[in-house]
Amino acid sequence: MIKIFAERLKKLRKEKRYTSKELAEYLGIGQRAYLYYESAVHYPDVPGLIKLADFFEVSIDYLLGRTEEQESV
């Protein structure tokens, strides 16, 4: 599941044309920590997952690969 999360996160970031540095700043973490998310090394904590889902306007289930539906309910 972490690989799906990493792929979706990177895809969403690129679609919105943000840099990894910009997303790291938004989350309040270092760029290296953020890149660990996109490299399938670590997941963000729960507040970080919520922030990412809100930022990209998708559900947490979509980010985690539990559904193919992007829309949050």
Image (cartoon, helix red, strand yellow):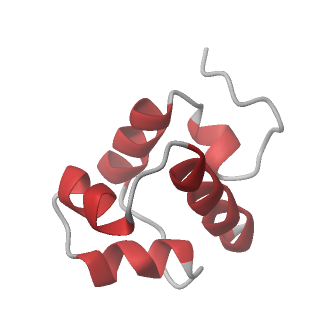
Q: Position of residue 62 (x, y in %)?
A: 69, 41
Q: Nearer the viewer, residue 68 or 26?
A: 26
Label count reads 0
Q: Compared to 36, does 26 lie above or below? A: above
Question: Which quadrant is the C terminus positioned in?
Answer: top right
Residue under the point 51% across and 53% down = 13
Residue displayed at 30% across by 47% down: 47
Residue depicted at 70% across the width and 30% down the height: 70
* Residue furthest front in the image: 17
Instruction: List x then y, in percent, for residue 41.
Output: 53, 85
The quarter of the picture where the N terminus appears is bottom right
| Residue at the spot 74% in from the left edge and 64% down from the top edge | 4
In the image, residue 17 lies at what x, y percent? 48, 49
Q: Would you place residue 12 above or below residue 45 in this image?
A: above
Front one among 54 and 60: 54
Report the side of 67 relative to 36 (left or right): right
Place of residue 32 in the rendered image (x, y in percent of width and height, measured from the top left): 31, 84
